[in-house]
Amino acid sequence: MEHHVKDPNLVKQGRQRIEWAEIEMPVLRSIRERLTRERPLAGLRIAACLHVTTETAALMRTLVAGGAQLRLCASNPLSTQDDVAAALVEEQTAVFAVKGEDRNTYYRHINQALDIKPHLTMDDGADLVSTIHSTRQELLKEVIAGTEETTTGVIRLRAMARDGALKYPMVAVNDAKTKHLFDNRYGTGQSTIDGLLRATNLLLAGKTLVICGYGSCGRGLASRARGMGAQVIVTEVSPLHALEAVMEGYQVLPMLEAAR
Ligand SMILES: NC(=O)c1ccc[n+]([C@@H]2O[C@H](COP(=O)([O-])OP(=O)(O)OC[C@H]3O[C@@H](n4cnc5c(N)ncnc54)[C@H](O)[C@@H]3O)[C@@H](O)[C@H]2O)c1
C-alpha cells in the first residue's frame, strides 16, 4: 500500500494513544457499531485532509468499519502526530503525513491522497476542494460530495458557491452547534494555550495576552487565559462581539493600540 509517514516503528505508541482518545469519544464509538453492521460506505473512496491526530484516527477507523476505502493527508504541516500516522498505516489506512513537512511535500501529499479518485472529500481548510477545482479537475466527475470542518474553509466555500464556482455539494461541519461548542470554543481554547506554553515555557499569570477576534475560538481562549492569570485584551471588528467582550470584563482595544 502506498503511504508516507515518518517512522513505522512508532506503531505501538500510536495505537495506545488512539485507544486512549477513543475512550473519550462515545458518540463515534456508537456510530462505528452501526456502521460495522450496516456497511453503508462499502465501495466508496474517500480522500481526507484533516489534522492527523488521535481523534482523526478514531474517525478514520470508523469510516473503514463502514466499508470505505481511505487516503488521509494532513490539513496542517505542524499538527501531525507521527506515531498515530504509523498506527493507521499498520491498519491499512494509506496516510501521507509527516510532522513538519515542507510546503512541497505538503502539496505532494494532498495530491497523493487525491490519487484515490475520491467519491467523497473531507477537508479542514478547503485544500482538497481547491486543489480539485484548480489542478485536478479531471477528478470532479466522480466526486459526489464533501465535508468542510473549519470556519475559514466554510467562508472560502460560500464565496465559491456564490460565484457559481463550487462544483459539488459540501456539508459545513462547522455549522453544527456541537462542533462550535466542543472544537472551537473549548478545544481550540485549550489547545492554543497548550501550544503557547509548550513553545515558550512561560508563566501565563501576569502576562498580557492579545486575542484577535472574540468569536467561538476567541471566547474559549480568553476565558482559559484569564483563568490562568493572564490579562486579556480583545480586538474585534464586530461591535456586538466587542461589547460582549467588554461585558465579560475584558479590555477591548483597536489592534494598533493592543499590539503596543
Ligand atoms: N486549528 C483548529 O483546530 C481550529 C478550530 C476551529 C477554528 N479554527 C479557526 O479559527 C478561526 C476563528 O474561528 P471561529 O470559529 O472562532 O470564527 P468566528 O467567526 O466565530 O469568530 C471570528 C471573530 O473574529 C472577528 N474578526 C474578524 N476579522 C477581524 C479582525 N480583522 N480583527 C479583529 N477581529 C476580527 C469576527 O468579528 C468574529 O467575532 C478561523 O480561522 C477558524 O478556521 C481553527
Image (cartoon, rainbow, N blue to C red):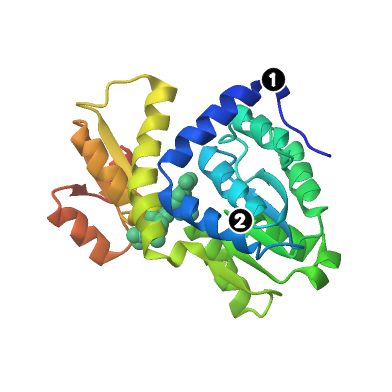
Tell which circle, 2 or 1, labels the residue nearer the N-terminal end: 1
- Against 45, residue 207 (above or below) is above
Q: Quadrant of ligand 1?
A: bottom left
State the residue in front, 32 or 207: 32
Whole-angstrom CA distance, mark 2 to mark 1, is: 29 Å
State the residue in front, 145 or 43: 43
Residue drawn where x is 76% and y is 37% of the image: 105
Q: Residue furthest right?
A: 138
Residue 24 in the image: x percent, y percent?
A: 40, 42
Q: How many marks?
A: 2
Judged left or right of residue 89, residue 115 is right
Q: Which residue is mark 2?
A: 36
The crowding category of the residue bearing disc 2, from other C-alpha atoms within 10 Å (few below 14, some 14 to 19, many at least 20), is: some
User: Which numbered tag is attached to residue 9?
Assistant: 1
Determine if residue 7 is in view: no
Q: Nearer the viewer, mark 2 or mark 1?
A: 2
Judged left or right of residue 204, residue 32 is right
Residue 18 in the image: x percent, y percent?
A: 53, 35
Q: Give the structural element (helix, strand or loop) at label 2.
A: helix
Residue 152 in the image: x percent, y percent?
A: 51, 58
Q: Give the structural element (helix, strand or loop) at label 1.
A: helix
Judged left or right of residue 5, residue 146 is left
